Image: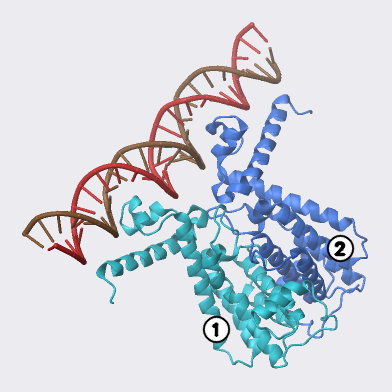
Chain colours: A blue, B cyan, C brown, D red
Amino acid sequence: MPPTPRQLARERTEAEILRIAREHLCTTGPANLSLRAIARELGIVSSAIYRYVSCRDDLLTLLVIDGYTALGDAVDQAISAVDTRDHLGRFTALGRTIRTWALAEPARYALLYGTPVPGYDAPGERTTEPGTRVIVALARITEQAWHDGHLRLESRDDEVALPEDVDRIRSEFALTAPPAVLERTALVWAALFGCVSFEVFGQYGPDTFSDPEALFEAHLLRLAGLLGLTR
Amino acid sequence: MPPTPRQLARERTEAEILRIAREHLCTTGPANLSLRAIARELGIVSSAIYRYVSCRDDLLTLLVIDGYTALGDAVDQAISAVDTRDHLGRFTALGRTIRTWALAEPARYALLYGTPVPGYDAPGERTTEPGTRVIVALARITEQAWHDGHLRLESRDDEVALPEDVDRIRSEFALTAPPAVLERTALVWAALFGCVSFEVFGQYGPDTFSDPEALFEAHLLRLAGLLGLTR
DNA sequence: GGCCTGTCAAGAGCAGCGCTCACTTTTGTG
DNA sequence: CACAAAAGTGAGCGCTGCTCTTGACAGGCC
């Protein structure tokens, strides 16, 4: 059945709340996100906001899901614009997209990959799936590269740190590449976000690197090498 | 001249404020650090706290310096306990110390390497020096390894992303290793903190890796390889 | 001893916050 | 048109950071 006018109005208000909340996130940060301020900007009295959002943590959950989804969509789209056989190109597209999105949306990035908000536990049943999209996309790239024979192995790649965990994950996602590939994928995943976080969070001093993008590109290529990607 | 009783009492109170603030940081986070709550726990009235700390941001600066100093001391001590010629041992000691300290002091780690506190600008003239101690220590390790001929170069290591910036930094710290070494040092630095942040901030799911320490050790060795450290 | 100055604590007060509750107004629909 | 559900109102509680005025007290100087 078609949505009633009431449902439409409600959805429009909910979307508007999310939009204002995203803006406020930039200036106040997640810990000081103010429901009163959002209500004020929305033009309703402070208590009326609770008709749409049960509490502040609920709004945070909506923002987390919203952020993971936006980043996941951006990454998926960037990857799918590159030839399936160009594994290095897909990897650099993934890395570049994460960095670009994070620099464009530092507050949302911080909500996802920065300090956890004290006293807030993201409900796993709602956030895990969108939250794993980037690492799943990265694992699919290395899996495809392995499948196509474009993943170089090293001499001591026959042993891995956590065989049980790695095997469980490999079977969960039906990965055929050797365990060491998944281990290196996890390292590159963490390293990638380390590079992006340092830049977004201002860990590099103000006048240390004149062209952070060029530095990131160089790091991306080295990480591709660490991954064993050829071509 | 000896410190007056006044000065002694004042210093004792300041140290006590810092201690309580560190505790509160764990539960409230830096953005919601409450001067009133600290004053209450100290047993003085809320306004009296401003005799010791000019404002909330000033307390944050004290905590930032305190944190960088504690981490820097821990890293320096761990490194100096390893033979000067054991460059791999010094590198893994540095990495392990960062991880151990971060897991033991997640709130202080988050203050240093997590999301910047919105609206708070750390005064560079007071925080830069303690804040660079870890990367300086890492650079000294790679420099020493290069000096001792224990740093492997790669074929395309003759070109570097930002020659001017890298050369400026090399001369500032009197580094003799080639530019590519510094570039890789920067990547490993970011990657290291990426691994630690993922673990401290709970980016790995609750039941993904049964033994995060073992995973970190494996990643450390791979990062040492990326650095080109031999033996 | 008396006084003056600088330090410290107290407490009231302002504006903002999350959230609740009793209440009124609006609105879609049988 | 009537009526119930939904949306909005405004007072109120206890908390926050921060300011300002007021008063207690100790050390140095005459």
Tag count in the figure? Answer: 2
Q: Crowding near pointer 2: few (<14 within 10 Å), some, many (20+)?
A: many
User: Is residue C10 shown left or right of residue B70?
Assistant: left
Residue shown at the point (56%, 63%) measured from the top left: B110
Question: What is the x, y in percent for residue A73?
Answer: 79, 51
In front of the other: B212 or D12:
D12
Mark 2: secondary structure: helix
Q: Residue at x 25, y 69 (%)?
A: B5
Q: Are marks 1 and 2 on the same chain?
A: no
Q: Position of residue B220 (x, y in %)?
A: 68, 79
Distance of mark 1 from mark 2, alpha carbons?
40 Å
Residue A35: image tag: none
Residue B151 position by quadrant: bottom right
Quarter containing the N terminus of chain B:
bottom left
Three-letter amino acid code of the residue under disc 1? Ala
- x and y, in percent, of residue B216 in the image: 65, 75
**Disc 2 designates what residue?**
A90
Residue B147, image x and y in percent?
69, 91
C23 versus A199 height, above or below: above
Chain letter of mark 1 equals B
- Quarter of the C terminus of chain B within the rendering: bottom right
User: Residue beneath label 1, please?
Assistant: B78
Residue type pointed to by label 2:
Arg
